[in-house]
Amino acid sequence: MYVTLLLNSSVHLFIHFAVLRSSNDTIAFYAYMTTHKPSPGNLHTLVFDAIFTNEGNGYNHHMGLFIAPKSALYVFTWTIRANDGSYFNTQLIVNGLVYGSMFSRDYYYSNSNSATAVVRVAAGVAVFVRTGPASNSGDIISSFDGYSTFSGWSID
């Protein structure tokens, strides 16, 4: 499967994925960040680089992208940890459009926030989490005390 991802108005990225599906056609992934992301800034794609589950091989842990192996209704959820006064707006991007948004803020020691979206996604469409266009300051943290995560699964 080849996918075209529009990175900005003048840059296209062509990606080739080998699509592997489980015997029962299950599509599901669950990934987390292995390190803190210091000052990621605005409109930065978040890469969840360690994979717990990747049924269907749709999640690319090098780029932080899920490419839908089949057209289906999907559930996506993400959790972001902040600390020491950090705050972040994060967005779920599906085919270049914002389908979910969440604000995370830590006032004292450490705080986690999660968001969920249910989205119909066509085969070959890219889904990822990025920081929003504003209201981002500090570090996103991820450690054994609690990981920043991204997951998704098909429900039809």
Image (cartoon, rainbow, N blue to C red):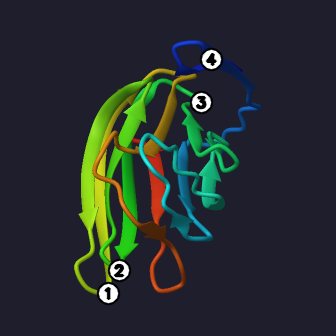
Q: Position of residue 77 (x, y in %)?
A: 37, 53
Q: CA distance from mark 1 to mark 3?
A: 39 Å
Q: How many marks?
A: 4
Q: Nearer the viewer, residue 16 or 133?
A: 133
Which residue is at 45% across, 50% downward? 41
Q: Tag 3 or tag 4, which sits nearer the N-term?
A: 4
* Numbered badge on residue 69: 3
Name which residue type carries label 1. Answer: Tyr
Q: CA distance from mark 4 to mark 3?
A: 23 Å
Q: CA distance from mark 3 to mark 2?
A: 39 Å
* Numbered badge on residue 84: 2
Q: CA distance from mark 2 to mark 1?
A: 6 Å
Q: Tag 3 or tag 1, which sits nearer the N-term?
A: 3
Residues packed near mark 4 inside 10 Å, few (<14), some (14 to 19) or many (20 plus): few
Q: Quadrant of the C terminus?
A: top left
* Numbered badge on residue 109: 1
Q: Nearer the viewer, mark 4 or mark 3?
A: 4
Q: Secondary structure at mark 1?
A: loop
Which residue is at 57% across, 22% downward? 124
* Numbered badge on residue 11: 4
Q: Tag 2 or tag 3, which sits nearer the N-term?
A: 3
Q: Position of residue 140 (x, y in %)?
A: 45, 66
Name which residue type carries label 4. Answer: Val
Q: Position of residue 137 (x, y in %)?
A: 36, 60
Please indicate, yes or no, whether residue 148 appears anywhere in the rendered image: yes
Q: CA distance from mark 4 to mark 2?
A: 36 Å
State yes or no: discs 3 and 2 in contact (Cβ < 8 Å). no
Residues packed near mark 1 inside 10 Å, few (<14), some (14 to 19) or many (20 plus): few
Q: Position of residue 123 (x, y in %)?
A: 54, 22
State yes or no: discs 1 and 3 in contact (Cβ < 8 Å). no
